[in-house]
Amino acid sequence: MIRKIFFKCVFFTIIICFFANHLGPIFSETRRGVGVWNDFYKEPKNTLDLVFMGSSLSYSSFNPLVINGSLKIKSYNLATALQNIKQSYYNLLEILKYQSPKTIVLEAYTLDIPDLSEENRLGFKFENLDGQKLSLGKLKATNQQFKSFKNKINALLPFVRNHNNWGNIELIEKNLEYTHIKNRFLGYKLVKTKVTSEEVKEGIKRLPLTHSFDDENLKYFKKFVELCKLNKIRIIVTRAPTLFYKYNKDYYLQAYKNTNEVCKANDLIYIDYNQKFDDLGLDMTCFWDPKHLNYKGATKVSESLVKDLKNKGITGEKTITKYNEPEDYIYSNAIANQGQTIFKGNFLINDSLKIKEVKVFNIRKDEYSVVVKMNKGLNPDLISEFGIGYYFYPIDSHVQFLETKKDLKRKYTSIGDHSIPMSSGNNIYIALRSLKTKMNSFKTIKIEIHNQTTNDLKYLVIKDVNFNKTFD
Amino acid sequence: MLFNSLDFAIFFPIVIITYWTLSSNLKVRNLFLLFSSYFFYAWWDWRFLGLIVFSSLIDYILGLAISKTKLEKQKKILVSTSIFVNLGFLFFFKYFNFFVISFVDAFKLFGTNLEVSTLHIVLPVGISFYTFQTLSYTIDIYRDKIKPTKNVINFFAFVSFFPQLVAGPIERASNLLPQFSEKHYFDYSKFKSGLLLICWGLIKKMIIADRAAIVVNEVYNNVENYNSLYYVYATILFAFQIYCDFSAYSDIAIGISRTMGFDLMKNFKTPYFSKSLTEFWRRWHISLSTWFRDYVYIPLGGSKKGNKRMYFNLFLVFLISGIWHGAAWTFVSWGIIHGVIIVLEKLSSNFRKIFFLKLGLGVMNFANKLFFVFVTFFIVCVSWVFFRANSFNDALLIFKKALIIKEYSFDFKNSEIDFFNIKTTFICIFILVIIEFIHNRKNLYKVLQKQGFVFRWGTYILAVLAILIFGVYGEYDDSQFIYFQF
């Protein structure tokens, strides 16, 4: 009898846990960090060569697509908001269960972030743990990061933590309708907007004066380094550029000095992008807030990191036979001849800008990328004031009716706001993307180039495109 | 530890599994229960464990002594000692500062400032309950109603029995003590009904009481900031908050005891369905009201010494009841209101019969019953204002503002209160009233047990999920049960 009751209780508890587990995502607000972990787990085991770790400064600055295309490796950005080195250490233990990267790029701000108290950065700590699978490692990480039993339960059971959202009907509806689409940026956060000078002024008021590392952070950094050594992982410590560098040079010099000392003591490579601020041509247009790079800035920094990694001998041996992203095409000469060229020539936008080639290639089912290659040797900043989009038309005659929106089937997307360019060698590329497009219903593609300063519009119309052909 | 806390969620399964699997030896089981109860009590504050042990020891010894003594005078001295010690502890811990402050305030009225300092005294949780429980033991022995127990473990376990230790029901030795001498065999249906009762208690506490508390606390703690209608809402919500909170504790206590084979007395019988205040007190906190009846009202003469004496006795009982609830003039006022109305009910009993008959309310049909239920509820709510208000002045301010009808406004936008919360709480209260109404007529537990496996388990799962989803916990902290402060 007792055994029967015991099994009934266990069975009942399992049912409740099952419901609680499934209700957790319904009651929780969507957090970026959870999606990043979900996508990480979907990567085939032991296929990642390089992993980015750290805080938002990492996921705003380093685009794995740029790295992958250029170096023929597979990388992933597993940074989460306000992640400090203690969290990075436990995250690494989790990563090593599924992947065996050869290189970790650790953004140095994780060392700067102290754990002022258990309640400090609580939501971010939960976010980092929510995405991780339940395991002994997660239990250990939870136990080490939280002392109070209540916070441990809140960390392990998002349903308990968020159950008060039952009254938030909009959130629940949104979560019920949500279908997770794998983030194509492999953990990088794409932001298209630009910071305003008012935001920078506000941020300057809160700048720290001195820089130092927390003892506990140094302790966990040491553990992190030892764990990497044990698993034969090379660490590259980076410090992402911020706008504050210009206004707080003393602080950043201290940060550089302190980080450099710690890296030297552990025989680690350290790259501080604040020191390359001017060389990279970074300015306000490269940031979406005073601390975080937008797509333009991230592309510049990622491309610079590619050079640094190449210099350190970090290249891959992967043969990319099929592009998975436009960056694979742009950065890899191996597949530069693939895709369908639908235009080749010199289309003048203005005296110094011309379109040399337009290619279309199929990324995934019903997802296409249009790559516009600009003139060789072009300064990418010159075209930053241009927006580039494209239109598909079912028949040529509709090309004439440009003003009528009814006739237009506009598919305007660009990677980065206002066509942020990517560079490879001397060429500048703009990659545009269309999702859910039935290409075979169209015959004409129109590339629109919009000058945001003068408000001029120019169109490159490419007719008689045989979209029935599959673009491989 | 609180019943709706994580600590208890771990403590309870450990205790219940150990209790049933440890040993079938009665002594071992009772010893285990005793240590579990002391652990439970010490979890709150281990320093006061000594007090409950001492109180138990005194009454154990005195109980045996009273029974052995044949001289009436000696018996009186011994039972008086028990009363003196128990009430002495209660007075010191609960009322010392109150009387000092009241004493000083009284002299201030005459222009004399006394310099008397108060003590920093921590009120031991449950002292009002377990002192009454042990007092009932010695008094019943004195009255030859029960025999004292020689089994020290049983007695100590009876006093400190953790399910009812801190907020009742106040058990009589004649009911609970013999159960420690009986061997309990595992009864699956009793165990199951105990678990369901615990679940029902948690629903009342976490979904209704704690949700109502959010609004009640905001309004009653910021009396100047709200208009009249808020006080009406808050008072009605408080009426259900205190009922759900207290009855939930009792239900959980009874449920826990039942899972271990013990039967505790019922403490509430849908009191808000009462048609008079007299009936209300037969349904509300039954263990306390019967305790006062048996150990205060009857010894004072009850109704056997004429009407005038009866009215006086009734008034005194409710005055003491008010004082028992708390060391503040608001509780005294609450007790006085009840005392006065009970006396008026008795005084006007014949007049009311004739009056209501002439008004067509004499026949107890559904509509008339509903009328009297609402009137009684209204009177009870008026008294709850004093019970909940932070001070006597606050209570008067609430009444003053509540009577200004022109200031009644349904605008909740500019307040700190989430109107959604008020709406939700009222919906839950409505559902509670329906369930209790039906349960009064047809035992819903028995109806549920007759259903198939899928329906039963579906109900259990929904109940637990309802607590987990709609319950107030986590962000709002483990909320105290109201009667803990007594």
Image (cartoon, coloured by chain):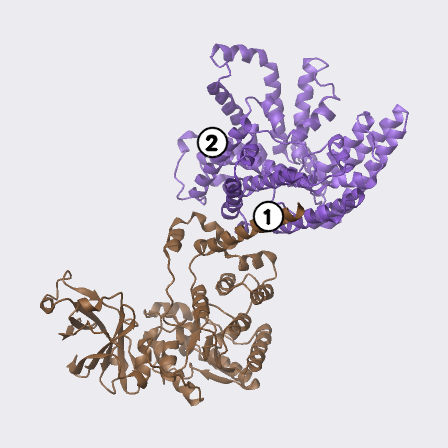
Relative to B466, is A190 above or below?
A: below
Question: Which type of secondary structure does the marked residue at label 1 adopt?
Answer: helix
Q: In the picture, which chain is purple?
A: B
Q: Mark 2 lies on which chain?
A: B
User: Residue B402 — which label?
Assistant: 2
| Nearer to the camera, A278 or A353 | A353
Foreground label between 1 and 2: 1
| Nearer to the camera, B385 or A236 | A236
**Residue B110 appears in the rendering:** no
Image location (x, y in percent) of residue A318: 40, 83
Q: Tell me how far mark 1 sits from mark 2, CA to CA.
A: 53 Å
* Residue at horizontal 76 percent and vertical 35 percent from the top: B177
Question: Which type of secondary structure does the marked residue at label 2 adopt?
Answer: helix
User: For the residue marked with disc 2, what is the amino acid?
Assistant: Ala
User: Residue A8 — which label?
Assistant: 1
Q: Which chain carries label 1?
A: A
Q: In the picture, which chain is brown?
A: A
User: For the residue marked with disc 1, what is the amino acid?
Assistant: Lys
* Residue at horizontal 56 percent and vertical 82 percent from the top: A229
Q: In which quarter of the image is the C terminus of chain B?
A: top right
| Nearer to the camera, A142 or A456 | A142
